[in-house]
Amino acid sequence: MYKHIAVYISNKDNKGKLIERLMSGKLISAISNLEGALFSEITLNKFIAEEIRHGSFNVKTETNNSLQYSSEGERKKALLTHIISRNPEFIVVDNVFGNLDVNAQIEIEKTLRDLSQKIPVIQITNRKNEILSFIKNNFQLQGENLVAFENIPESQDKSKNESFIHALPKPENPVKERYNSIVEFNNVSVTYGGRNIINNINWKIKPAEFWHLKGPNGSGKSTILSMIFGDNPKAYGQNITLFGVKKGSGESVWEIKRKIGYFSSDMLRGFSRLDAIGNMIVSGFADTIGLYKTPTNEQIKIAQQWLHVLDMFDIRKQPFLSLSKGHQRLVLIARAMVKNPPLLILDEPTNGLDDADAKLFTKLINKIAAESNTAILYVSHRKEENLKPHFIFELVPENTGSIGKQIQ
Ligand SMILES: Nc1ncnc2c1ncn2[C@@H]1O[C@H](COP(=O)(O)OP(=O)(O)OP(=O)(O)O)[C@@H](O)[C@H]1O
């Protein structure tokens, strides 16, 4: 019987370094001479970059799609199948359930359980309730070393101390435009290569409403988002109205994006600069990373109020990258909100956060929903504890494409 282990980390730990040491066999002597494989977003991104570079793909999904054009869940399943086919001698699995719906989680857990009969499985996780059930040896990082413990202690609940006591700032220019609806889909259907993805979706989001869009992997959540926020050509010729204007009737993608604050956990990869926290927030007015335009006094005032909301005024001059992953996300939400957009889109926003940071993040989103006129579209397959959406719209896959229904 192999010894399988879980390493529970917080967002403060250096995961990259941990992975490097695990893979090189420096950290665990039992695997020091073995050839391991890494199941992680890092590996996935490497394969996607190769696909883009070479224009061909080795890792195929169940529907024979490339990784680039697949949903997050499909990618993860394809990657695991590919890794196992290469017969590794041990496997390190990182954020194994991130982006996966319940069924995919059960499926992947079973695959890993079967694999654990043959090779050691080492899991890295920052969510306590995601430790694989067949792993009984839990460790945490203490400096450079792994320290065993029986029961994982409650991580320090930062959200208890941070409660965002300051009110949200009042908008720079109170909304001039009034909308009857923010997003309206009428009988919207999409097919890719003859495959029906979504079928006859009817959905209306009104100002200031807080919606959770959920659905299993591959059900079409990102497809719907790309028709609102992106320039998915599938949106044309459909009956979609955004901010009162029928899509395709003249309004540019840029004009639509101007009305939307957007956050996805993927965005964090784009920031390698040394911008200060305060500048990062005020740059939301200009939709740029970094400060290229001098902000007005009014804009500076609003950004400062947001810094107070986040309790970061005193550290506003520190580099954005010096913050924890959880706090970086709070700053990016403030950055998306400074313009007081009529719509805030949050795409799988808590992916990769540890328990305490996820709690803090949802607290801020609930506050925005309660105190602003911004409609919120929160997209996630996972039910986030403590999140308080007004409505839930669920995509339910069927042979003829996913249908959509309001379940709350
Ligand atoms: N450009 C494309 N070409 C071909 N197929 C595509 C393309 N974009 C999406 N698809 C397919 O459409 C389906 C829906 O994908 P989408 O990414 O919208 O699902 P999702 O609900 O966001 O899934 P996940 O939770 O796994 O991210 C998937 O089967 C995907 O492979």
Image (cartoon, rainbow, N blue to C red):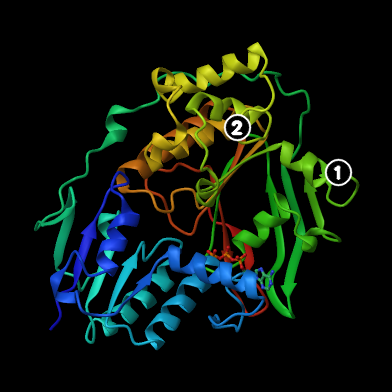
Ligand 1: quadrant of the figure: bottom right
Check disc 1 and give the amino acid type: Glu
Q: Which x, y percent locates residue 34? A: 24, 80
Check disc 2 and give the amino acid type: Gly
Which residue is found at the position 63% from the left and 62% from the top?
Answer: 404
Q: Is residue 394 left or right of residue 97?
A: right
Q: Which x, y percent locates residue 147? A: 11, 55
> 271 above or below 188?
above
Residue matched to label 2: 290
Q: Which x, y percent locates residue 163? A: 36, 27
Q: Which x, y percent locates residue 46? A: 50, 67
User: Residue 364 appears in which quarter of the rendering?
Assistant: top left
User: Residue 87 appears in which quarter of the rendering?
Assistant: bottom left
Give the mark nearest the N terminus, 2 or 1: 1
Q: Which mark is residue 251?
A: 1
| Circle 1 Cα neighbour tier, 10 Å, few/some/many (<14 / 14–19 / ≥20) | few
Instruction: Specify the farthest residue to the right.
Output: 250
